[in-house]
Image (cartoon, rainbow, N blue to C red):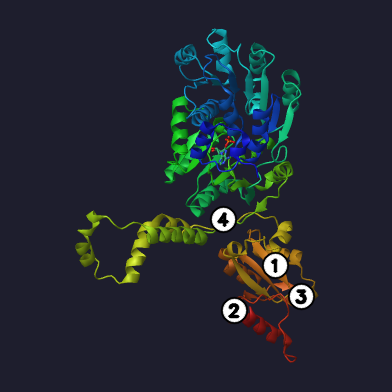
Amino acid sequence: MINFEEMGFTPRILKAIQELGFEHPMPVQKKVIPLMLGNESDIIALAQTGTGKTAAFGLPLVQATDTEINNTQALVLCPTRELCIQITGDLTDYARYTGKLRILAIYGGASIDNQIRGLKKGAHIIVATPGRLIDLIDRRAAKLSDVSTVILDEADEMLNMGFLDSINEILEEIPEGRRTLLFSATMSSEIASIARKYMNNPAEITIGTKNSSAENVSHIYYLVHAKDKYKVLKRIADFEPDIYAIVFCRTRKETQEVASKLINDGYNADALHGDLSQAQRDAVMQKFRLRNLQLLVATDVAARGLDVDDLTHVINFSLPDDTEIYTHRCGRTGRAGKTGISISLVHLREKQNLQKIERLVKKPFKAIPIPTGSEICGKQLFNWVNKLETVATDHPEIEKFLPEIKSKLSGLDREELLKRVVSLEFDRFLDDYRHGEDLIDPVPEKDHSFRKSGRKGTREQYTGNYKRLFINLGKSDGFYPEQLIELVNVNTKGRKIPIGKIDLLKTFSFFEVEAGHADDLIGALNNAKFLNRRVAVEIAQEKTDRSGRSEYPGKKPAKWSKRKPEKRRWREVQRTF
Ligand code: AMP
């Protein structure tokens, strides 16, 4: 495997690379760096954000810049102010041992006078957003006549933001003999036409599949009623105590509403959208970058250019209308070789949209049951217990109070003490979830085969929500899932009773019902008639074998009494399951 030392970098650049902790080049770096250091060809690289593309062009660019010449030798164009600041910071890091290299960030929304002063001092490399750069070209403050390398970063985003004319105008300013590199997550006809017009026989590099999302992102979704979306979001946050995520909403209004609710409910969250001033947006983004915020609720436009690694999740509170936006969203997690999870809250009417996105990212989306209240309480409790186990206790200030504390609590035994500490810590969760109803994902009845398959890998979560019932009807009675659902519907008169996994056997069956409805349903079905047979339903009791494993009643129990088959079978089943 080729490493940085073999790529032709000077010792000063290698020292910076080492200090940044880059051990091995990432795929885009392996492809782009040798081309940049080895010859003069133009390059088109199709690579998502997070693949290491800034270092791919930035390290060779810094190395190739001559600090003895005072002119601007390289221009990096990018779509947003945040990305502009980010790239400038990265290039400065790469140049920390190369002496007097001046790198200047030029972007809108900040003092133009400071930028003019910076240009007057001379900048070897300019990193700019197109609008402000044009402004400075028009004022004759920015001079691009000596630029020999141009990088168009996130070219597709620049086009999405309507910068095509500005890019054309800027490229017209730069001498023809330049070298041009274009980075884009996707290849569209507009990108191809820029390449034709301004690039000379470019080498094409593709990292990952074109238009596909990051390899190490898994895509999951919760089917929810639209009215329950916010509750489900809260559950996700409660179920993942260490979550660090962007929650994407569709509109500014929705973004603000969701963020305000989260803040009111005590979550470490804030909003990022276009109705905020630039200063407010900067403050929120900085808080998020520093991890002083766990949940950033944002619109797609406002979150553009926010460059944060280590996100644990991206949450699509609303699915985007434009399926390509989805790939941009989820490209924000699973970066720099890490894994990430993209969660979508989907209501039934959106299932088609979900399928379109699935086709685009070429990965299956896994349906996951909504965490139940008891699962959340368990997760929170054990997270807290882990912290309790590892918390540092060497605070001398506490020592002096200990004797008095001990004497005050001497009447409580260990168990009582533990219970009180836990209750104190978990008041909110216990109250919310002990008394709150469990949200049920609205799996349509005809989709019950999906439940039947046990939702791969999630059975423990799934069964936590349901009770398993026994019914004295089976396949030999012509009793199949449709008949079961009909029987339930007819006898519960329009009440929606969620049914889970169904196991049909020859003369009897098991099925799951959402726990809160179990008694209700047993009452409604007992003594009902199915094809003139009296129906009998009861909670199935699980029997465990000696190892503690549950015996699955997929097959008929081994021995049946010949004399009283019905009654005997019933009891046998009650005992074996
Ligand atoms: P980018 O695609 O340029 O936004 O880079 C994504 C992240 O990967 C940044 O935080 C970089 O610091 C990090 N990174 C870039 N190159 C490497 C490397 N060779 N090894 C480890 N991390 C890297």
In the rendered image, which quarter is residue 211 located in?
Answer: top right
Residue 50 is at least partly visible in this image: no
Tell me if label 3 and label 4 are in contact, CB under 8 Å: no
Q: Secondary structure at mark 4?
A: loop
Q: Secondary structure at mark 1?
A: strand
**Percent coordinates x, y for residue 468 in the rendering:** 62, 70
Residue at image mark 2: 544
Front position among marks 1 and 2: 2
Q: Amino acid at mark 4?
A: Leu
Q: Amino acid at mark 1?
A: Ile
First in residue order: circle 1 vs circle 3: 1
Q: Amino acid at mark 3?
A: Asn
Q: Secondary structure at mark 2?
A: loop
Badge 2 density bin: few <14, some 14–19, many ≥20, Cα 10 Å: some
First in residue order: circle 1 vs circle 2: 1
First in residue order: circle 2 vs circle 3: 3
Residue at image mark 4: 439
Separation (CA) of disc 4 from disc 2: 29 Å
First in residue order: circle 4 vs circle 1: 4
Which mark, by number, is residue 515? none
Which residue is located at x 60 percent, y 22 percent? 77
Residue at image mark 3: 532
Q: Amino acid at mark 2?
A: Thr
Separation (CA) of disc 3 from disc 4: 36 Å
**Percent coordinates x, y for residue 355 in the rendering:** 72, 45
Separation (CA) of disc 1 from disc 3: 22 Å
Residue at image mark 1: 502
Q: Choose between 290 and 45: the one closer to the eye.
A: 45
Which residue is located at x 61 percent, y 16 percent? 147
Badge 4 density bin: few <14, some 14–19, many ≥20, Cα 10 Å: some
